[in-house]
Image (cartoon, helix red, strand yellow):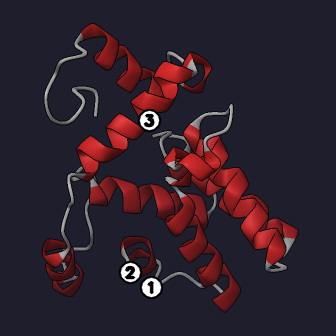
């Protein structure tokens, strides 16, 4: 919803918009048990999306763009400098978690976002990333977002609510 609204003025083809939707849907898929492989959750989600797009015969260039968008969505300063799908997924994530902003003129989008339940996503997502990292510390390199979450958890494992590094 957020990334699509931000893309309204971009010259994206219909297939690029579909690829953007897939990237948004899969960006945290690596936290799901079905995609809990040995790599960081971002990479596992990117691989899952790429497999999905391959099954649906998307062009290799779009699969690569979706892979990058998902793999880099937790990489501030990098994702914003790449192609439109990567920038848009990163923007959607930052807006969703309150550090980005939507257009001041898009009151409809802001109103829709206010109506959507948060369902404790900050707690659920942080716990999912940490749970995987506790089992496989290699999934949370020290200089990464998962690494920060794991370090905060290990420093204060009984902290209630959202992870302090979230």
Q: Is residue 109 above or below residue 78?
A: below
Q: Quadrant of the N terminus?
A: bottom left
Secondary structure under the numbered disc 1 in the rendered image: loop
Q: Position of residue 100 (x, y in %)?
A: 28, 55
Q: CA distance from mark 3 to mark 2?
A: 28 Å
Q: Is residue 48 above or below residue 107?
A: above
**Residue in the picture at 58% in, 65% down:** 23
Name the foreground residue: 110 vs 102.
110
**Residue 67 appears left or right of 135:** right
Q: Position of residue 14 (x, y in %)?
A: 65, 90
Name the foreground residue: 110 vs 8.
110
Return the residue at label 1. 8
- Label 2 environment density (alpha carbons within 10 Å; few <14, some 14–19, many ≥20): some
Secondary structure under the numbered disc 2 in the rendered image: helix
Q: Quadrant of residue 19?
A: bottom right
Residue 66 visible in the displayed image: yes
**Residue in the picture at 38% in, 56% down:** 93
Residue 62 visible in the displayed image: no
**Residue in the picture at 49% in, 53% down:** 28
- Label 3 environment density (alpha carbons within 10 Å; few <14, some 14–19, many ≥20): many
Return the residue at label 3. 129
Q: Residue furthest top?
A: 155
What is the number of callouts on the image? 3
Residue depth check, mark 1 versus mark 3: number of the one nearer the observer:
3
Are the residues flagged by discs 1 and 2 in contact, CB closer than 8 Å? yes
Return the residue at label 2. 5
Are the residues flagged by discs 1 and 3 in contact, CB closer than 8 Å? no
Q: CA distance from mark 1 to mark 2?
A: 5 Å
**Lower sequence index among marks 3 and 2:** 2
**Residue 158 appears left or right of 19:** left
**Lower sequence index among marks 1 and 3:** 1
């Amino acid at each position: 919803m957020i990334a699509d609204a931000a893309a309204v003025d971009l010259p994206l083809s219909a297939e690029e918009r579909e690829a953007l939707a897939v990237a948004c849907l899969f960006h945290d898929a690596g936290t799901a048990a079905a995609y809990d492989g040995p790599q960081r959750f971002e990479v596992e989600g990117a691989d899952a999306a790429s497999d999905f797009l391959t099954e649906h015969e998307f062009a290799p260039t779009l699969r690569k763009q979706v892979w990058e968008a998902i793999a880099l969505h937790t990489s501030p300063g990098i994702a914003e400098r790449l192609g439109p799908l990567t920038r848009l997924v990163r923007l959607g994530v930052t807006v969703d978690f309150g550090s980005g902003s939507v257009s001041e003129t898009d009151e409809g989008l802001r109103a829709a976002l206010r109506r959507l339940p948060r369902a404790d996503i900050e707690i659920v997502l942080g716990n999912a990333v940490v749970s995987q990292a506790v089992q496989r510390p290699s999934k949370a390199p020290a200089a990464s977002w998962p690494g920060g979450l794991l370090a905060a958890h290990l420093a204060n494992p009984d902290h209630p609510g959202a992870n302090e590094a979230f």
